[in-house]
Image: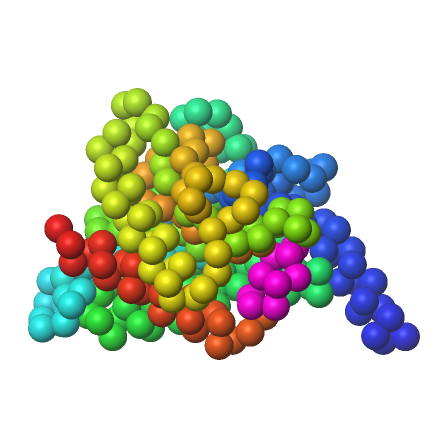
Amino acid sequence: MRFAGRALIALAWAGALTACSGSGDSGYAPVGAAPPVGEVERTATWPVPSQGADSANSAESAQPVVPTPKAGTRTPGKPLAGKIVVLDPGHNGGNASHPKEINRLVDIVTGRKPCNTTGTATDSGYSEHAFNWDVAIRLQKVLKKEGATVVLTRLNDQGVGPCIDARAAIGTKAKADAVLSIHADGAGPSDHGFHVILPGRVPGHNDAIIASSQRLGLAIRSAYRAGTGVPYANYIGKKAIAIRTDLGGLNLATRPSVLIECGNMRNKGDAADFTSASFRQKAADSLAVGLTAFLTSS
Ligand SMILES: [Zn+2]
């Protein structure tokens, strides 16, 4: 009874989730909406301090306050001393139960998209938001050891949001040297492999970070491929690189930014990797190698 109940809940949950990124990549559909509107993060307003009962505000008020890195806190002598990295674990654990907040539309320059989405899950019910969070925390630890200042776009895996535009603004506010959004896709069962999404040019908005984001993306691609053994995606992108202008986090970015879809949660092989803690550590270590290569190359 107890287990049957759990199974039902798990099925319902999985059904409510949507592909991580539409059209193959970071697609996320709004909570409670009919499936496939893929989207990722777009954002607009940053530190939205909670003011009153506005649901969106109350959602975001639970989100991180971006620390302002101080020069004195930097660790000299380490490879990433003085570097600021923003890690953006996609989605959040409370999104599914807060459709009103999450479905609110925000401006992403090329259109309007929901504030945030639920993300996807493996067939066994391991959620994408939990995966993204776990990898981000592991990665944060590695980067800090290397001397970097690391800012997360959310403080835990139980909150709601923040909206995609707010996530982008965190990178700006932190003056990040690199911004990495971490996701896993929800594509068809035979689709597998990873890909990295680069910002497409949105004239007058992200022109300044197109070239640097491309360098960042290529470094992430090489390191993730070499470090995890996960192949390039067989269903999207070219050699694991996709360029998009429908993602708020990338359209609104003012710092070098990319998004990685670490694999496809709906694929059995990729899912087996994701549910392994040792794989997630390997993923984090690989991403650290990619970030370090980028941050120390210029
Ligand atoms: Zn996602």
Taking 188 as reference, is 279 left or right? Answer: left
Task: Name the residue furthest top.
Answer: 203
- For this rendering, which residue is in front, 65 or 149? 149
Coloring applied to the structure: rainbow
Is residue 44 in sight in this rendering?
A: no
Q: Is residue 40 above or below residue 95?
A: above
Q: Position of residue 40 (x, y in %)?
A: 50, 41
In the figure, residue 94 lies in which quadrant?
bottom right
| 267 inside magenta stretch | yes
- For this rendering, which residue is in front, 58 or 175? 175
- For this rendering, which residue is in front, 285 or 223? 223
Span of residues in magenta: 265-274
Total tally of numbered discs in the picture: 0
| 2 inside magenta stretch | no
Q: Position of residue 99 (x, y in %)?
A: 64, 45
Q: Is residue 52 above or below residue 205?
A: below
Q: Residue at x 23, y 42 (%)?
A: 212
Q: Position of residue 179 (x, y in %)?
A: 31, 51
Q: Residue at x 44, y 25 (%)?
A: 110
In the figure, residue 71 lies in which quadrant?
bottom left
Q: Position of residue 62 (x, y in %)?
A: 47, 57
Quadrant showing the N terminus: bottom right
Q: Is residue 292 above or below residue 190?
A: below
Q: Is residue 293 above or below residue 169?
A: below
Q: Residue at x 52, y 41 (%)?
A: 236
- For this rendering, which residue is in front, 289 or 205? 289
Q: Residue at x 44, y 55 (%)?
A: 182
Is residue 297 in sight in this rendering?
A: yes
Task: State the predominant SS element of the stretch in magenta.
Answer: helix
